[in-house]
Image (cartoon, grey):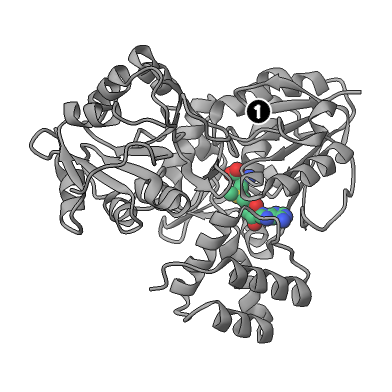
Amino acid sequence: MQNIDFTKYRVVVIGGSAGSFPVITKILGMLNSDFPLPILLCLHRLKHIRNGFVEALNIKSNIHVIEPEDKTMIKSGFAYLAPSNYHLTIEIGNYISLTTEELINFSRPSIDLSFDSASYVYKDRLIGIILSGANKDGAKGMCRIKSRGGLSIIQDPVEASVKTMPESVLSICKPDMVLKTDGIIELLNKIKK
Amino acid sequence: MIQDIDIKELRNLIATIKEIYRYDFSNYAISSFKRRILRILELYKISGVEELITKIKTNRMFLEEVIKEITVNTTEMFRDPSMWRTLRETILPQFKNNNTIRIWHAACSSGEEVYSMGILLKEAGLSEKTSIFASDINEDVLKTAKQGIYPTRTLELNMSNYERFAGIGKLSDYYKLIDNNEKYVFDKSILKNVMFRTHDLVLDESFSKFDIILCRNVMIYFNFELQDKVVQLFENSLFTGGYLVLGSKETIAWCKSAKSFSVVNVEDKIYKKIG
Ligand SMILES: C[S@@+](CC[C@H](N)C(=O)[O-])C[C@H]1O[C@@H](n2cnc3c(N)ncnc32)[C@H](O)[C@@H]1O
C-alpha cells in the first residue's frame, strides 16, 4: 500500500449486512466527534422494519446518523443511512438521490449501486469499506472504487462474523487494505480535511 | 458491456426524443437516468447511445418500450402502511360531510396504489361519493392498472402491507386467483369511480381540482427545477385545504411552492394547501 494522503478524501462509504451491526456501532462510537468527512452507510436491513434502526445506531454514535430524504446535501458531521426499500446514490453536486429501481443482488438498498455512484462522483477522493455480510453485494462496487483510484478497505474475513461479503471482494480484486475493526477506526481517525 | 455514457451523448438522446416524440427528460435526475439508459443498452444488446438514437428515430413502438424502461415502475399496495392508516384515520374523516371527494393518483404506475385507495374507501364506506383520477405517462402500465391483474409472486408483500395497514377484512376478500394461481385479479367493483388517463407531469397542464393528490416516489426521479414545477402544478390542482401526499423520503421543503403548504405529517409526508 502506497503512503496514504490523509487530507485528500471527501467522503467515506461503508457497506455491510449480516454481522455488520456491532462493527458499525463500534466504528461510529469510536470515531473522533469532529470526524471531518460525511459518511454514507449502506446496510442491508429487513425491508419493512423502518423505524428503530437509526435510533439504535445513534445511541452510541459520535456522529449524527440520519436517514436522508431525497436530494439532501451531503455535509460532514453526518452519517447518512440508506432508508429501507430505497437505493441511495450520489449525484454530481454533492447531494443524495434515492431511487426505487429494481433490486440489485436481491437488495434494495444495494451496496454495489451506492459504491459505484459515489465513486463516479468522488473518484480518488472516496474511501470505501466493506464489512461482514452474507451476500456478494458490494464486491463489484468496492472494486469499482479501487479502479477509480479511491481507497478500498475490507474488514478482515478472519474477524468478520460472516465472511462472504469481504471474501467476495477478494475474489474479484485486491483491495488496498484488509483491516480489523480497530484498524479501520485507527485509520479513519487519522483523516484530516 | 458498456460501463459509462458521456453526458453529451445523453443530451443528444434527450434532444432527439423531445424533438420527435414530445417527451422531455431534460430535467430528470441525471445519474438514475444514465443508469436506465445503460440498462436499456444491455437489455436490447445495443452498442451505444448513437445506435439507440437511430433505432428510436425510426420506430415509435420501440420508443414506447424505451420510455417504459426509463421510467421506474416499481410499486406495491399499501406501501408505507402508516401513511395509509393516517389517510384513513385523520385525513379522510374530514371529508365525511362533503358531497364529493376528489382524488388524483398522479403517476400511478400499474395501479397498486389505486386499488389500495379503492379498498380503503370501500372499508370506510366512502366509495360512493369519491371520484378518483389515476394517471401516468406510460400507457402500458395504465393498461395493467385497468385490468387489475398481477402476478402471484407480488401477493406476499401486498398481503403483509395490508395486514400492517390493519384493514377490516382480508386482502383475499378483494381478488381471486386465476391462470392456475399464477395471477390474481381484483374485483372490478373497487374501480367503480376510477377514471384512468395518460398525463405527463412535465408537459401537461392541470386538468381539474382535487381534495387529495398522491404523487409518491415519482419526483425522486426529477431534478430540483422539475420538482419545483410539478409541485406548482399540484398547488394549482388542489382546492384550498386539500392535501398533497408524497413518498416517505420525498419533501417539498426545497420548492418555491413550499410556502403555500403546511406540513400535516412529517413522517407520512402529508402536506396541506393553505391560503
Ligand atoms: C416508481 S413509480 C411510482 C408508483 C407509485 N406511486 C408508488 O409510489 O408506489 C413512478 C411512476 O412515475 C411515472 N412517471 C415518470 N415520469 C412521469 C411523467 N413525466 N409524467 C407522469 N408520470 C411519470 C412512471 O411511468 C412510473 O409509473
Report the chain holding disc 1: B
Q: Which residue lies under the disc numbered 1?
A: B269
Q: Please provide percent x and percent y for residue B33.
A: 58, 59
B241 sits to left or right of A160: right
Camera-nearest residue between A165 and A120: A120
Q: Please provide percent x and percent y for residue A92.
A: 56, 50
Residue at the spot 66% in from the left edge and 33% down from the top edge = B251
Q: Quadrant of the C terminus of chain A?
A: top left
Camera-nearest residue between A171 and B149: A171
Q: Is residue A123 at all visible to an observer of this figure?
A: yes
Q: Please provide percent x and percent y for residue A10.
A: 43, 39
Residue at the spot 21% in from the left edge and 31% down from the top edge = A19
- The image quarter in which residue B254 lies: top right
Q: Amino acid at mark 1?
A: Lys
**Label total for image:** 1
Residue at the spot 82% in from the left edge and 26% down from the top edge = B259
In the picture shown, does residue B17 fall above or below B229?
below
